[in-house]
Image (cartoon, grey):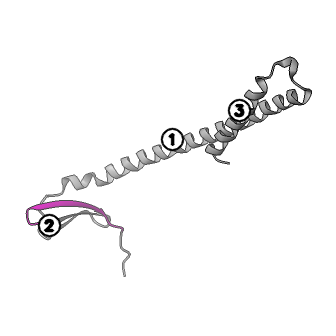
Amino acid sequence: MDDIQLCKDIMDLKQELQNLVAIPEKEKTKLQKQREDELIQKIHKLVQKRDFLVDDAEVKRLREQEEDKEMADFLRIKLKPLDKVTKSPANGVSLCCPGWSAVVQSQLTGSFASWVHAILLPQLPE
């Protein structure tokens, strides 16, 4: 059961409970009073389930955010040598860390040049 379905179920139960609560206490049957108690318990259980799902989603979001930060830090450290590469390599490719990184100049138009950073996986010897 997902968060949206839980919210819908809670709202339906709350509506039914509100209808029962609107009945004056003196006029309620024993069955209606029992139903009130059942509804309160069901709502309570569903709210606990929803809280668990929300907490779980928040933990996952924070974990992913931390993983993103770690990856960004890792790439910043690994790609830092690319900032020190000369901007005009003779053959168009300059390896700054052989086996994993390269800076390539490509002519996209006659007057526009861009530098592309690429991570290249190490090649096994043949």
Instruction: Say which of 70 and 36 sits in front.
Output: 36
| Magenta stretch: dominant secondary structure | strand
Contact (Cβ within 8 Å) of mark 2 with mark 1: no
Q: Residue at x 76, y 23 (%)?
A: 22
Disc 3, SS:
helix
Instruction: Say which of 110 and 90 sits in front.
Output: 110
Q: Quadrant of residue 85?
A: bottom left
Name which residue type carries label 2. Answer: Gln
- Disc 2 crowd rating (10 Å Cα; few below 14, some 14-19, many 20+) is few
Q: Which residue is mark 2?
A: 107
State how far apart marks 2 and 1 are (Cα). Answer: 41 Å
Disc 2, SS:
strand
The numbered mark at residue 62 is 1
- Disc 1 crowd rating (10 Å Cα; few below 14, some 14-19, many 20+) is few
State how far apart marks 2 and 3 are (Cα). Answer: 66 Å
Name which residue type carries label 1. Answer: Leu
Q: Quadrant of residue 90?
A: bottom left
- Where is residue 38 drawn, in percent x and y? 82, 33
Q: What stretch of residues is rendered in magenta?
A: 107-121
Name which residue type carries label 3. Answer: Gln
State how far apart marks 1 and 3 are (Cα). Answer: 35 Å
Q: Residue at x 77, y 24 (%)?
A: 21
Q: Which residue is mark 3?
A: 15
Q: Residue at x 70, y 37 (%)?
A: 12
- Disc 3 crowd rating (10 Å Cα; few below 14, some 14-19, many 20+) is few
